[in-house]
Amino acid sequence: MRCRGPSRRRGLRRQRRGHAHPRGAGRRGLDLPVLGRLGLGCITTILGVPPAAAPVVHGRLHPLGPGKDSATGHWELMGAVTPVALPIYPHGFPADVLERMEQAAGRPFCCNRPYDGTAVIDDFGAHHLATGELILYTSADSVAQIAAHVDVLDEAALHAACRAVRAQLTGEHAVGRVIARPFTGPPGAFARTPGRRDFAIDPPSRTYLDELGDAGVAVHAVGKVSDLFAGRGIGHAHDGKTNTQALGATTALLSELEGGMIFTNLVETDQLYGHRKDVEGFARALQEIDAAVGTWLGLLRPGDLLVLTADHGVDPLTAHTDHTREHVPLLATGTGLDRHRHDGPMADVGATVLRWLTGREAPGLPGAPFAG
């Protein structure tokens, strides 16, 4: 394909889809006609999704680094690989680190150990309301999560506290993300609000987003993408606190923009269904995504590229509620794109984005283009 400048092409449209599991979605399996037609069933055996007769570019991608969470997964897609695993805290944060975090937040913490995100507010929410202590917990990933009832600390104040804690977690304690988890409701009926915010460390190295920025390509981030890159390389950030909101924002951008890249994260696929082990909910989320992809295909113009992939696994049928380290799917379609199987590192997505939108390559970054 002959490369064109970004002013002549509408750009790459990229959306995150959770890792589909063939089991548990009903006796007949998943019902994903659009993704199936593109070739989802050609990547691996998926009940209900037979191989397509004429699949688009399809395959599976693997991480190069040791991570399996949202931050490291998104970084890898854009060519930044963590050289070592980010710190985790299976026994909670040590006393000296905890003291610094409490000073930064301006309040003491309770819990301070790995915990399920909904169980922790059920178990510690009443104590939090009575004492004002913020609920600090972690997981198998490199995260510090801070939960607060909106009547104790409103969302803006919780975000400010998490931002201050983020500034304290550096060096050997530079966790991947500090996550604000506001919730509401009375004891016995606590519920998270959509006001989650992720405060990530900077990517460990230069990314393909930096390359795109240097080339003058506008990058539009939908959902928590901007937070995951600490804003680096992002030109425009758009809300996407639910799957429905993020899908709608992506559709609107596809209809309005004349060029650039749209980078979308669908947070509920992971947060509500994968982590909560809700197999039927996961299947319904995939159906909503499938319908949106059908709309997007009708909005693509000559010169557009649509890439569908994921940033990590989160199998709702595992015995735990943490992320699972596995391959992620790849589906890609665009004008003049040769149809073929492509397996490789996740960084191939970023390499393809750069070549497709600019005609350039970045020899210093990992990954090789599969198109453009």
Image: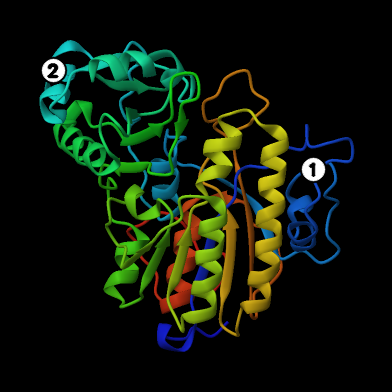
With respect to residue 152, does 93 lie above or below?
Answer: above
Mark 1 falls on what kind of element? loop
- In this image, 254 relative to 340: left or right? left
**Quadrant of the drawing holding the N terminus:** bottom right
Tag 1: amino acid: Ile
Q: Position of residue 273 (x, y in %)?
A: 61, 36
Name the residue rendered at 72%, 52% in the picture: 287
- In this image, 135 relative to 247: left or right? left
- In this image, 218 relative to 105: left or right? right
Name the residue rendered at 63%, 28% in the picture: 277
Q: On residue 46, which mark appears?
A: 1
With respect to residue 282, does 168 lie above or below?
Answer: above
Query: Pointer 1: residues within 10 angstroms few (<14), some, or many (20+)?
Result: some
- Closest to the observer: 303 or 92? 92
Q: On residue 99, which mark appears?
A: 2
Q: On residue 132, which mark appears?
A: none
**Residue extending furthest toward the bottom:** 8
- In this image, 144 relative to 288: left or right? left
Q: Position of residue 218 (x, y in %)?
A: 36, 74
Q: Position of residue 238 (x, y in %)?
A: 39, 62
**Quadrant of the drawing holding the C terminus:** bottom right
With respect to residue 275, does 94 lie above or below?
Answer: above
- Closest to the observer: 68 or 116? 116
Mark 2 falls on what kind of element? helix
Q: Badges 1 and 2: C-beta atoms under 8 Å apart?
A: no
